[in-house]
Amino acid sequence: MAEDAGQGTGWTPGSLPEVPGTAEWARMRERKNANSRAHLVDYIQSDGARGYFRELPAENGPGAVVHLVLRTVGRTTGRPYLTPLIYAPWADECLVVASKSGHPKHPAWYLNLTARPEVEWQVRDRRFRGTWRVAEGEERTAMWEFLCAYVKIFPRYQARTSRLLPIVVLTPSMRIEERWTVPEYAYVGLGAD
């Protein structure tokens, strides 16, 4: 069952202001972070039964997109952080985009990811440990075209920033059975760790 992406928060993926760093942008990010936290709690507590599919407005892609939960380790605190992200399957791998809605700086989850060679993620009720890499060259071009056809807001995010939005490729090496819980600090939004 698909869910409304902005239910109860006043935010939808199509309602983004165009200028990062403005007060309007900050208010939007606060609403989006609250929505992401609620999404994360629902996803983890239901073990992926809810929150895997989420509706996007028609101008941003298909009716529903799929999400995974990325588990990174804070590069300064060493604490685990959980972040729900739109993803796309690519053969046996998963693709996520470090877009931060087109903000000039990388998202905190991406900065934490770059500090370690391994990462964990959950897709529905399956949790994985594996490696990650940033797609480059012709591979990135093919992946970007695929992702932009799937989530039409990605080109808009790219147009907002001078940084090239990283496409992170998650490659599983093993399943993990541990079921995750959501600590109070779990979601990394605007802040960095």
Image (cartoon, rainbow, N blue to C red):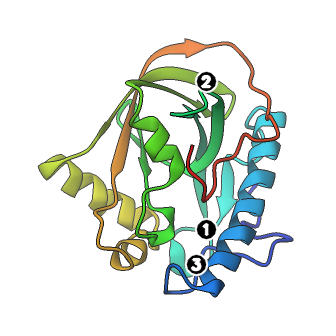
Viewer-closest of 1 and 161? 161
Residue 164 in the image, given as x and y percentages of width and height: 28, 63
| Image height of 7 relative to 48, above or below | below
Is the residue 169 above or below the residue 51 in the image? above
Say whether residue 25 is left or right of residue 44.
Answer: left
Gap between marks 2 and 3, in whole Å?
A: 30 Å
Secondary structure under the numbered disc 1 in the rendered image: loop
Looking at numbered disc 1 in the image, what kind of residue is underneath it? Gly
Which residue corresponds to mark 1? 63
The residue that appears at 50% across and 87% down in the rendered structure is 18
Residue at x-position 60% and y-position 80%: 25
Residue type of the residue flagged with mark 3: Ala
Q: Where does residue 171 sit, x and y in percent of width and height?
A: 38, 27
Q: Callout 1: 10 Å neighbours few (<14), some, many (20+)?
A: some
- Give the residue number, with chain letter if any, for mark 3: 58
Three-letter code, disc 2: Arg
Secondary structure, mark 3, is: helix
Image position of 186 (left or right of 93): right
In the rendered image, residue 73, in percent from the top left (x then y), is placed at: 56, 30
Q: Quadrant of residue 150?
A: bottom left
Q: Are marks 3 and 1 in contact (CB under 8 Å)?
A: yes
Mark closest to the chain's N terminus, 3 or 1: 3
Pointer 2: what residue?
127
Distance between the Cα atoms at labels 2 and 1?
Answer: 26 Å
